[in-house]
Amino acid sequence: MKKILLTICAGSIGLLSFAQKIDKVINAAEVERIEKVLSSDDMQGRKTFTPGIDKAADFIAAEFAKSKLAFFGDSKTYFQEFIMTKAKAVDVSGTLDSEPLTAANIAANTTSAEINITSLQDYQVVVVKKEDDFSKVVFPVFDLEKNVIVLVDTAHTRRFKGMQRFAGNAKFKSAVSQVFILTGNLNPAAINLHIKNELTEQHLKNVVGVLPGKSKKDEYVVFSGHYDHLGIGKADKNQDSIFNGANDDAAGTTAVMMLAKYFSAQKEKNERTIIFVAFTAEEIGGFGSRYFSKQLTADKVVAMFNIEMIGTQSKWGYNSAYITGYEKSDMGKILQNNLAGSKFHFEPDPYPKQNLFYRSDNATLAELGVPAHTISTAKMEEAPNDEPNYHKQSDDISTLDMNNMAEIIKAVAISSTSIINGKDTPSRVAKLQ
C-alpha cells in the first residue's frame, strides 16, 4: 500500500511540475488572442473561395512560422494547395419515358462539361422510395466511383432541393457522374437526357506545418482542425449576418496552433514527426482532409488528433472531453493513462447515433485504418440539450469558455506525449470496407 501511495504521489508531483511549465505556453489569454482573430468579423465567416478564408490561412501560416515549423514535403510554403472543379448546368433537356427532364427535377454530381444518357443500362440505377430514409440512400452515392442514376420519389422534394445545392458544389476532378432525378416514375423504361455544364476551377489550401522527428521520423502523429466555416448569410433581428464559427471550428484550429507552439518549445523531444494541419472545405464535404490524406501513406500515420468544437463545456462539465470512435482503438485508454493523477478525463463518445466518428476530418484516415479520432466537447443531442449556437450567427467568441479550452488543449498535449516520444503506439482501426 505504501508503494502504491508513493507512486500516486510521485505521479501527482510530476503532473504538477509538468502543468507549471505548460501553463507558460498554453493559457486562457493565449487562447483568447488566437480565437479573437480567427472568429473576428474581419474573417467574414471564413467561407471557402472567399477573401475571408485567405486571411485566416495567412494568419495561421504566420503563427506556424513563429513556432518555427518546417514545411510539409517539398512545399516552399505552409500552404498545401489544390484545385477543385465546379460544374454549373447551363442547359438541361430530355425525357424519362414521357416525363420532361429540366433543371427543376435534375441534379448532377459531376465535373464533366457534358452528359448524354440514352440508356438506363449504361448507369447503375438507385431508387429512393417514399418510405426510404433519404440521407441513408442518397449520400453514400456521392462516394461511389461509378456512373449512377438516382430516381428520387417526389415525396422527398424538399430534401431533393437541398441536395441539388450540395451536388452543385465544387469537387475533385472525376470521370464519373451521378445524376439525380426527382420523379414519380421509379421504374422507367427509357431515358434521354442531355446536360451541358460550364466548368470553372476553384483553388483551395490547407495550412500545414511539421516538426520533424528524431529516431522515428518516418512515423507521423497528426494534430488537425478545420478553419473554414459558413461565411455570410442573412441578418436577423438578434444577430448580424456573419457566421463567425468561433466554436466550429476556430476553437479546434486555435488548439492546433497552440499545440504547435507548445511542442516546438519542447526542443526536439518528439521522436516521431508531428504534422499540424488546418483543413479547408470541411463544411462543403471534407475536401481538405481528403486531399491531405492522399499525400500520406496511411500505414505511416501512428495517430491523428482531430480537434472539433471544444469551446463549450461537455455534458460532464469542466475538465472533460469525449473521443469519437473510442472503442475502435486503444488510443483513448493511452491518453487517459497519461492523465493519471490529474482532474481531466476523456470519455467515450456519448452520441453514437450521430455517427460522429465518420462526420469530421478524421474520417478519411480512419477509413484507411489509422487510429484517427476527433476530440470534442460539443453537445450533439436533440434540442434543447444540443449546442444552441451550432451553425448560427450567434457562434461568436462571447459564447466560449477560454479557461476550459486552455485545459482541454493542455490535456491533449500531456496525454499525447507518450505517442509522440514513441513509447506508445495505438492499435489500428478496422479499415472501412
Image (tube, grey):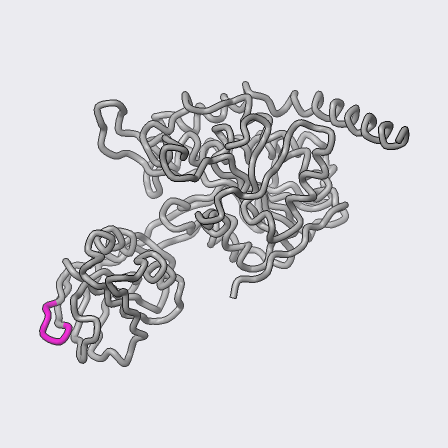
Please state which of residues 357 and 192 is positioned toward the viewer in this rendering: 357
**Extreme residue in the right direction:** 2
Which x, y percent locates residue 36? 44, 23
Q: Which residues are magenta?
A: 96-100
Quarter of the rendering containing residue 149: bottom left
Residue 26 against residue 290 in the figure, above or below: above
Q: Would residue 207 be found to the left or right of residue 126 on screen?
A: right
Residue 5 visible here: yes
Quarter of the rendering containing residue 369: bottom right
Taking the spot 48% from the left edge, 29% from the top edge, the residue there is 311
Taking the spot 35% from the left edge, 68% from the top edge, the residue there is 175
Residue 248 against residue 299 in the figure, above or below: above
Position of the N terminus by quadrant: top right
Q: How many marks?
A: 0
Taking the spot 50% from the left edge, 40% from the top edge, the residue there is 225
Which x, y percent locates residue 91? 14, 62
Which x, y percent locates residue 385? 41, 33
Please state which of residues 146 and 38 is positioned toward the viewer in this rendering: 146
Residue 78 visible here: no
Which x, y percent locates residue 212? 67, 44
- Kindly report the secondary structure that dominates the magenta region of the rendered protein: strand
**Residue 99 within the segment the image draws in magenta:** yes
Quarter of the rendering containing residue 67: top right
**Residue 340 within the segment the image draws in magenta:** no
Q: Would residue 271 be found to the left or right of residue 111 on screen?
A: right
**Extreme residue in the top direction:** 29
